[in-house]
């Protein structure tokens, strides 16, 4: 969160922490036996939460040589860990088990089992509510209540979800090659279908107007302003030779980064429908993350490479 460090998890288990500007390695943590699946920084940038195939939640104090707190997340593997925006709470999804912890790793709430494996967890911008997704439902929980405060049902396999920054929309990418929307206040929903493949990449811009989606070799951007995206024609950005594997809007700016399975990273000005820069990495692009100040972009590849790009001043 302070932009100083980049943490990267390898499928073999280790977690490497690098100085973002120099590339110097600060620490190499053992991670999780069998593979580390998920990482989340606390807001103070001093602690890093991780989960993996050993079913354990681990919280690493990166200022104290990697000292860790460890807890049982409730299932044989941990798919998702997510700190809230202030860092006071941490949510985990392990199999069908949803759990809430305080920032130190003390268990606050073990919720009733979900009907299927939890695919994703996201916090709302106000940090009091968080949302889980599994097959057939999206449920929102308040940190001080044991039962969901709102649930949206839909018969389909959800792969990822994203709250718009203004908390008016929930968007999900789905196994059946579709994107689903819910309006938070009314519960009204709509669906965008016809993608070439399952949609595992969804990203909102900072204004909450535009939603970028994967599901093909083309970046598809829906305009959710005005009456919403229903019946509208999306913007389509073509610059990849293979299906997309990562998307990331800037935190405050308007630029969009896309990564493909062929290893290409593209940076776009979506409003101008213009490709600004591109670079090729070895292997599929597995993650794209903008620094908090939007001056750096980190790209990770399936070949174990991390590349940090500095934003041009031009």
Image (spheres, rainbow, N blue to C red):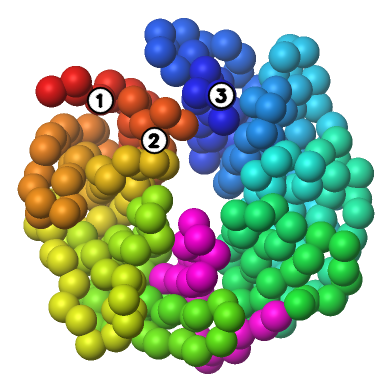
Please tell me which residue lies in front, 163 or 281. 163
Residue 147 in the image: x percent, y percent? 84, 76
Spatial CA span between label 2 and label 1: 10 Å
Q: Dot 3: few (<14), some (14–19), or many (≥20) neighbours within 10 Å?
A: few
Q: Quadrant of residue 199?
A: bottom left
Identify the residue position indicated by label 1 in the image: 311
Residue name at image x 15 percent, y 66 percent: 235
Q: Quadrant of the N terminus?
A: top right
Residue under label 2, please give it: 290
Task: State the CA–CA distance, disc 3 to disc 1.
Answer: 17 Å
Characterize the magenta stretch by its predominant secondary structure. Answer: strand
Q: Looking at the image, is mark 2 or mark 1 earlier in the sequence?
A: 2
- The residue labelled by disc 3 is 2
Residue depicted at x 60% and y 54%:
125
Instruction: Please provide percent x and percent y for residue 120.
Output: 58, 62
- Say the numbered circle drawn on residue 212: none
Residue 158 is situated, as x and y percent measured from the top left of the image, at 50, 75
Dot 3 and dot 1 residues touching (CB under 8 Å): no
- Would you say residue 161 is visible in this rendering? yes
Query: Can you tell which quarter of the image residue 187 is in?
Result: bottom right
Residue at disc 1, secondary structure: loop
Judge whether residue 167 is colored magenta.
yes
- Tell me where the magenta segment starts and ends, as one range: 150-173
Comes first in the chain, label 3 or label 2: 3
């Amino acid at each position: 969160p302070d932009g100083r460090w980049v943490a990267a998890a390898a499928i073999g288990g280790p977690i490497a922490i690098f100085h973002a500007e120099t590339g110097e390695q600060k620490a190499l943590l053992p991670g999780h036996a069998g593979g580390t699946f998920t990482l989340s920084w606390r807001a103070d940038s001093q602690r890093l939460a991780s989960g993996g195939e050993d079913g354990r939640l681990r919280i690493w104090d990166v200022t104290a040589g990697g000292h860790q707190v460890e807890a049982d997340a409730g299932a044989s593997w941990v798919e998702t860990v997510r700190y809230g925006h202030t860092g006071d709470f941490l949510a985990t999804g392990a199999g069908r088990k949803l759990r809430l912890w305080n920032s130190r790793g003390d268990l606050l709430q073990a919720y009733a089992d979900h009907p299927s494996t939890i695919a994703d967890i996201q916090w709302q911008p106000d940090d009091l509510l968080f949302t889980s997704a599994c097959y057939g439902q999206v449920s929102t929980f308040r940190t001080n209540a044991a039962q969901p405060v709102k649930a949206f049902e839909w018969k389909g396999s959800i792969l990822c979800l994203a709250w718009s920054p203004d908390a008016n929309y929930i968007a999900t990418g789905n196994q059946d090659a579709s994107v689903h929307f819910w309006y938070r206040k009314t519960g009204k929903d709509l669906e965008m279908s016809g993608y070439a493949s399952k949609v595992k990449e969804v990203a909102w811009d900072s204004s909450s107007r535009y939603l970028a989606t994967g599901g093909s070799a083309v970046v598809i951007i829906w305009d959710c302003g005005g009456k919403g995206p229903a019946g509208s024609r999306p913007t389509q950005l073509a610059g990849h030779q293979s299906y997309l594997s990562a998307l990331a809007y800037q935190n405050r700016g308007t630029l969009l980064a896309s990564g493909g399975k062929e290893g290409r990273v593209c940076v776009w000005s979506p409003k101008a429908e213009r490709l600004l820069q591109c670079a090729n990495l070895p292997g599929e692009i597995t993650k794209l993350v903008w620094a908090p100040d939007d001056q750096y972009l980190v790209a990770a590849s399936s070949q174990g490479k991390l590349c940090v790009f500095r934003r041009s001043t031009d």
